[in-house]
Image: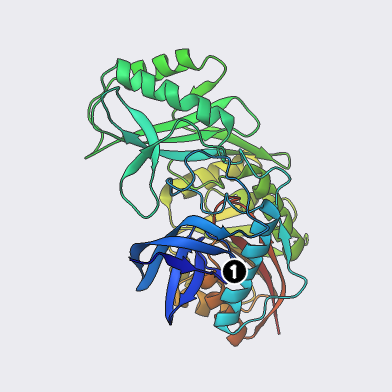
Amino acid sequence: MAPLILRPTALAHGGAAVAHEAGKVWLVNYALPGEEVEAEPRGRQGGVAVAAATRVIEASPHRVEAPCPYFGQCGGCQLQHAAYSHQLELKREVVAQAWSRAGLRLPPDTVVVGMDEPWRYRIRGEFEAVGGPEGWRWGFHRLRSHSVLPIDACPIHDRRIERALPAFAQAANELGLKGLQNLLVTVEPTGPGILWRLRFRGGEPAWPKEDFARRTAELLPDQVLLDDSMSLEFWDLTFRVRSDTFVQTNYRQMLELYRVAMEMLEPRPEDRVLDLYAGIGTISVAVAARTSRVSAIEENPHAVQLGRLNARINSAAVDFVPGKVEEALRGVRLGSHSAVILDPPRAGCEPEAVAELIRLGVERLVYISCEPSTHARDLVGLVRGGYRVRRAAIVDMFPQTYHIESVALLERS
């Protein structure tokens, strides 16, 4: 059979490059736009044929050698073969395409905020447990697969996480632990703490947790093991974070993301601000330091509990409202707030939430998103409801991967 030769022309959201051959569309992993590659078919994804580049015939000038020995097998990173400056260009194009498909135009002055050092940025990692003849190891899922690839290093994670992995595995092996599923590890960005949680298949059995923690601590003498919560500090504010609540995994870029969002929101002392999908209150508390009051809506009860604690720790005027955003917004009176900031999950807002935002009609609305397609979809709904997109920015929270964080400022027409 003749080899499959493809020449991709653009990057798709997901990290694969898009190629057309004999009227057929292909998603080609590990290729860059403008290259000519020999590829191997790898099934279908969402009705589109998928292939993986096995040989580069004509390389892009932006192609670089991936530093990670697992790149090409591990499903965690998709863009290590692209120079970082080109990754930022590609991500801007992906966002622009998503907006264009929705009928919007990405503002020409949209900035892309990258990192000076786009490695070792993750302060949180989730690692799958892999059992073998030599005992437990940790790894990641292979690309588009449920099978797990054992790893000994990961250059996008904080070095403290990388150093901790063999200690957690050794303690598990010495104690003969069975049925491990995964390990969630988060390190304090500005402190020595390392927050951990071990999960078991089929629920947590009776196991020697204290012995495990003690042995792991002995193997990590320069770190402080934490199994309940840890500290997160920025802008002279202090927050408590737990394993069962969301935290931005890139601390350095989180500060850039919040800076961009604050510049767009321009909170004033007289403002009352709504923070939707508020999580543990990092944005709410930061905004409250500059305004009269913040109402924070969050569905996760653990996050609400922690958010209220964080508001007290920082003496912040934040009222937490538990519940789904689309339901809680029905109880918000017209004219009670002057601005909204929202950072929903990847699925974006429910249509009812967009409708409620249009009903409230606040002056300024800052929408943070981690998914370009749902961001564009919701922005179109808000524009149809009387808003105009004034500014946009892209913050690269996840270098070496396809993930994109974008921010938009909307104002009432």
Q: Is 352 on the left-hand or right-hand side of 109?
A: left
- Give, as a three-letter code, the residue at label 1: Val
Image quadrant in which you'd find residue 68: top right
Density class for disc 1 (Cα within 10 Å; few <14, some 14-19, many ≥20) is: many
* Percent of width and height locating residue 141: 37, 46
- The quadrant of the picture occupied by the N terminus is bottom left
Residue closest to the eye, 136 or 318: 136
Q: Is residue 395 visible?
A: no
Q: State whether residue 197 is above or below residue 397.
A: above
Q: Nearer the viewer, residue 17 or 38?
A: 38
Q: Where does the C terminus fall, quadrant-wise?
A: bottom right
Q: Position of residue 136 (x, y in %)?
A: 32, 27
From what the image shows, is residue 365 above or below residue 154?
A: below
Number of on-image labels: 1
Left or right, residue 385 beside residue 149: right
The residue lying at 69 percent from left, 48 percent from top is: 255
Furthest toward the front, the residue is: 2
Image position of 102 with respect to 223: above or below = below
Q: Is residue 286 visible?
A: yes
| Left/right of residue 234 with respect to residue 3 in the rendered view | right
Colouring convention used in this rendered image of the protein: rainbow
Q: Secondary structure at mark 1?
A: helix
Q: Which residue is mark 1?
A: 94
Residue 106 vs 241, above or below: the answer is below
Q: Who's the residue at 49% across and 31% down the image?
A: 195
User: What residue appears at the point 72 percent right and 50 percent down from the top-left corner?
Assistant: 289
Residue at 78 percent of width and 59 percent of height: 269
Q: Percent position (x, y) of residue 280?
A: 53, 48
257 relative to 384 in the view: left or right: right
Observer-nearest of 397 and 198: 397
Q: Position of residue 382 (x, y in %)?
A: 59, 80
370 or 128, which lies in front?
Answer: 128
